[in-house]
Amino acid sequence: MPVPGEVSLAHRGVLFLDEFGEFPLPVLEALRQPVEAGNVAIARKGISVTFPADIQLIAATNPCPCGFSGDPVKPCRCSPRSVERYRRKLSGPLIDRFDLRVIVGRPERGGLIGPRGESSAVVRRRVELARGAQLERGYLNRSLDRAHLDELPWGSEAVRLLQAAVERFAVTGRGYDRVRRVARTIADLAGVDVVREAHAAEALSFRGE
């Protein structure tokens, strides 16, 4: 009898997968359906079971097996073929399901010994205000479908930039909606009602586009 796995056990929570690129390819590809649908469907020997899997998926991975591809200080020891094979495991459809893709490079000296940034309390307050604005609209941004996104106020410059991204970078339909959700969230964190060009540009930058 099927039993809930890690994805279902993280229902309504966060599932963090470290060393994402080291996971077997079938495991990585199996994540696509739960992340998109919010549930896990299992069929075995005439038995069909559906488990809830409404999760926030966070993953971290090295750029290559040795971890130093593109590093400005330490040279990469991997062959071009091994780097390509490593990165190919993260397919386009899988990566398309991640709203944010943040490249974390080697920390600079100023970032380690320089002045501290905002306190957690200040950031938390900003997040609480943004979440409150979303609840006033009736939906958290993560739940906005295309119809709801279309109804929200968008600046003309932001619309043109997003349309250009679809044409120039071949952003998928799924990716288009995801980047708009991120842009709306950035605007909420800034405390403004209309999504502007800067918000759309920042959202696109988080997709590497």
Image: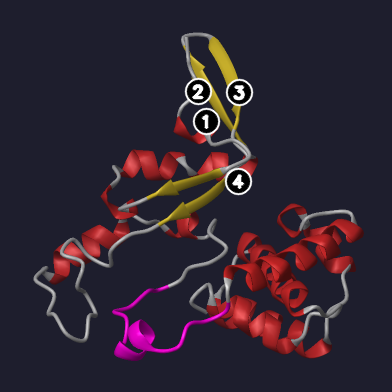
Cα distance in 3D space between marks 3 and 2: 9 Å
Give the image location of residue 76, x and y in percent. Answer: 13, 74
Q: Which residues are magenta?
A: 103-118
Give the image location of residue 131, x and y in percent. Answer: 77, 61
Q: Which residue is mark 4?
A: 36
Of the numbered discs 4 and 3, the one sitting upstream in the chain is 4
Residue 110 placement, left or right of 139: left
At x 65%, y 63%, the residue is 178
The three-letter code of the residue at mark 2 reads: Pro
Mark whose residue sits in front, 1 or 4: 1
Q: Is residue 123 above or below residue 98?
A: below
At x 48%, y 17%, the residue is 3
Marks 2 and 4 in Cβ contact (< 8 Å): no
Of the numbered discs 1 and 4, the one sitting upstream in the chain is 1
Q: Which residue is mark 3?
A: 50
Q: Is residue 32 above or below residue 5?
A: below
Residue 4's disc number: 2
Mark whose residue sits in front, 2 or 1: 1
Query: For the residue carrying disc 3, how many other residues have a C-alpha within 10 Å: few (<14), some (14-19), or many (20+)?
Result: few
Q: Is residue 6 above or below residue 20?
A: above
Cα distance in 3D space between marks 1 and 4: 17 Å
Cα distance in 3D space between marks 2 and 1: 6 Å
Cα distance in 3D space between marks 2 and 4: 18 Å
Cα distance in 3D space between marks 4 and 3: 14 Å
Query: For the residue carrying disc 4, how many other residues have a C-alpha within 10 Å: few (<14), some (14-19), or many (20+)?
Result: some
